[in-house]
Amino acid sequence: MAEPTGNPHRFVLRVYYEDTDAGGIVYYANYLRYAERARTELLRDLGVENSRLMRDDNVTLAVRWCAVDYLRPAVLDDCLVVETSLQRVGGATLEAIQTVQRQDVDLVRIDLKLGCMLLDGGAARLPAAVRERLSSFINSNGS
C-alpha cells in the first residue's frame, strides 16, 4: 500500500446506533459507506456532482478495486474523519487512499481504484472538465 500524498480532503461524521453491531462497534461494511460519502463530498467540493455526471455526461464512477485494512474499531458516538487523498488521475480511472480516523488515529485504511463507466455499463473516459478538476486538486495539494 502506498502512502497518501498531499493534503487530503476531510469529511467529518458521527457514528450512530444504526452503524453498529450488538456490541456497539461499527459494522465493517459501513466503513465503505463512510468512504463513499467522503468521495461524494470531495467531488461536490470540486464542483462535480454525481447527479450531473449521470444526467449530462451519461457516466458514473464505480469502484473497480479496493483493499481495506481494519486497524482499530470505531464505536457508537465516535466522531470520525474520513481523509481522502487522490493519488493519480488517468483517462478513465482515478486512484485514492482513504483513512478513517478518530482523533488523528487511523482506524481503517482503504486503497482504491475507481473507473469511469457509461450508465449502461460500458467503459468510458472521464469527462475532460472532471479530469482537470481532479488533477488540479492533486496538484494544489503538493502531489
Image (spheres, rainbow, N blue to C red):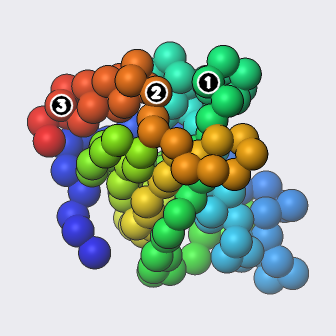
Question: Which numbered disc covers residue 57?
Answer: 1
Residue 81 in percent (x, y) is at: 50, 49
Q: Camera-side residue: 131 or 15? A: 131
* Residue 86 position within the rendered picture, expressed as x and y whole percent measured from the top left: 33, 46
At 40% from the left and 19% from the top, the residue drawn is: 129
Q: If you read the primary sequence from the N terminus, does the residue marked by circle 2 or circle 3 appear first?
A: 2
Q: Callout 3: helix, strand or loop?
A: helix
Question: Mark 2 or mark 3, which is nearer to you?
Answer: 2
Asked if residue 75 is positioned above or below residue 55 in the image, the reply reads: below
- Residue located beneath label 3 in the image: 139
Residue that carries the numbered disc 2 in the rendered image: 127
> On screen, 91 above or below 66?
above
Circles 2 and 3, Cβ within 8 Å, touching? The answer is no
Where disc 2 sits, the SS reads: loop
Q: Amino acid at mark 3?
A: Asn
Q: Can I make out residue 13 in this image?
A: no
- Location of the C terminus by quadrant is top left
Q: Mark 2: few, some, or many residues within 10 Å (few <14, many ≥20)? A: some
User: Residue 105's x, y, as percent?
Assistant: 38, 64
Q: CA distance from mark 1 to mark 3?
A: 25 Å
Circle 1 residues within 10 Å: few <14, some 14–19, many ≥20: few
